[in-house]
Amino acid sequence: MHERSSVADLAGSLRSELNRYSPGEKLPSSRALVERFRASPVTVSRAIAQLAAEGLVVTRPGSGAFRAQPRAAAGPAGDTSWQEVSLSGDGGPEAVPRSVDASGVLATLAAPATGVVEFNGGYLHSSLQPERALAAALARAGRRPGAWGRPPTDGLTELRAWFAHEIGPALTAADVLITAGGQSALATALRALAPPGAPVLVESPTYPGMLAVARATGLRPVPVPADTDGVRPDLLADAFRATGARVFVCQPLFQNPTGAVLARARRAEAVRIAREAGAFIVEDDFARRLVHDDAGPLPPPLAADDPDGVVVHVCSLTKVTSPSLRVGALAARGPVLERLRAIQVVDSFFVPRPIQEAALELVGTPTWSRHLRSLSTELRTRRTALTAALRSELPALAVPHIPAGGGSLWVGLPGTGAGADESAMVSAALRAGVAIAPGRPYFCAEPPAPHVRLSYAAAAGTAEITEGVRRLRTAWEDALDAPEATLGG
């Protein structure tokens, strides 16, 4: 049999063979399974553990694995229709809707089927992740004295100090809270800064996960248009006056999805406008370590020069390492820090200490800087490959801005039928074997034009990027030929 390195594949094969064994009968030994499936002992062990977790087999140390007794028949299905009434109840005229559309988030988290080019992913491809360094850091962290004990609720002092140094010299460890990734930090910040039902200003377009967090918190996202230089200060000031909002969420560096960097002249202006409105800026600095090697010097975070505590800073290590290293930071000054701390403690108590220790181990070694340099080069190479392929194969698509950081391109589709164009293109692309993200979830109001987002960080490499764009050209042609197609106007 061919090499079977996938735990899921091996578990599926064993699951399909279980009927050959009577309840209580012993399965072949791990050694026999290793030889038969040409899999590693670790893969076999994990596959057996998966079946045990499903209740299909029982393992006995020193004896092996045995087929489990059949499960009792499930009882009659209950009647859950009452929940529709309960969940749809508005709780009165002042209540805000409690339903949340997570489709935009799920689109970047869902793993495509085998053979599908992943242009819709929100994280680095495994080939770009520092997996060996992460494994070594976690192993060292697990051996640290006290590594499995309860950490300080604010986070390890050394890790908070590291984040403070990265954000700017004006901050100290006392200004930082360790969070379970950037998404958790955003949720904490929004809950701390605005009451349910309040408006929150957001860039348009913006990250769907932030819109989902805002709506789950009971807030009303209000769009503020941005261009290739970031949010427009004149429209930001107008939005504060018109809505009375006390929070503005932005990504000043390599904004998702546009890749825009907030222009130098607009940075101080945005902080001044928020300060005059008595409002906070939540700065989501998610992409600073996803900079490309042709970017030039980066502007410091807005929080680095903010003596009045207008900016609440959010950042994390997740995007630049692995989806599973969910370690981030919230930084703030003044009374708001205590509110952030209280909400974080109530929600999660603390981030597990072994994960914090592993993060410290990772960023404290020379491997960390080597990873950042290598990633910077690789991302620029992949961005260049995607841009060149689009220009060659799909010149009708518009790429208004080529970012020098982040991991994706924001691509405009010709025509004006936003919903129809996007849905036709996304569906045709998937049929052609490439997954792309529709642009509609990035807008909290009606989009001005149809878009898609193409991730080059999630792809396997330049060869796959080139192949993905070739498939996109096929999808484009199929979508144009479809009945009632609106692509191209």
Image: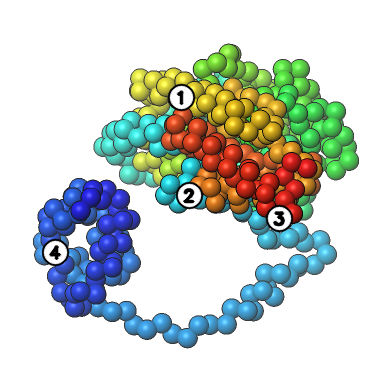
Q: Which residue is mark 1?
A: 378
Q: Report, in whole angstroms, how far the alpha carbon at label 1 lies from the one at label 3.
A: 41 Å
Farthest residue to the front: give it.
481
Q: Which image quadrant for residue 303?
A: top right
User: Residue sitting at 48 percent across and 49 percent down?
Assistant: 112
Q: Which residue is mark 2?
A: 112
Q: Earlier in the sequence, mark 1 or mark 2?
A: 2
Q: Residue 317's x, y, as percent?
A: 48, 33
Q: Amino acid at mark 1?
A: Glu
Q: Which image quadrant for residue 167?
A: top right
Q: Residue 111's x, y, as percent?
A: 47, 49
Q: Report, in whole angstroms, how far the alpha carbon at label 1 lies from the one at label 2.
A: 22 Å
Q: Which residue is mark 3?
A: 483
Observer-nearest of 29 and 156: 29
Observer-nearest of 430 and 339: 430
Image side of residue 72 versus residue 428, left or right = left
User: Residue sitting at 50 percent across and 83 percent down?
Assistant: 77
Q: Earlier in the sequence, mark 2 or mark 3?
A: 2
Q: Which residue is mark 4?
A: 28
Q: Amino acid at mark 3?
A: Pro
Q: Amino acid at mark 2?
A: Pro
Depth check, mark 4 against mark 3: the one in front is 3
Image side of residue 207 versus residue 155, left or right = right
Q: Report, in whole angstroms, how far the alpha carbon at label 4 lies from the one at label 2.
A: 33 Å
SS class, disc 1? helix
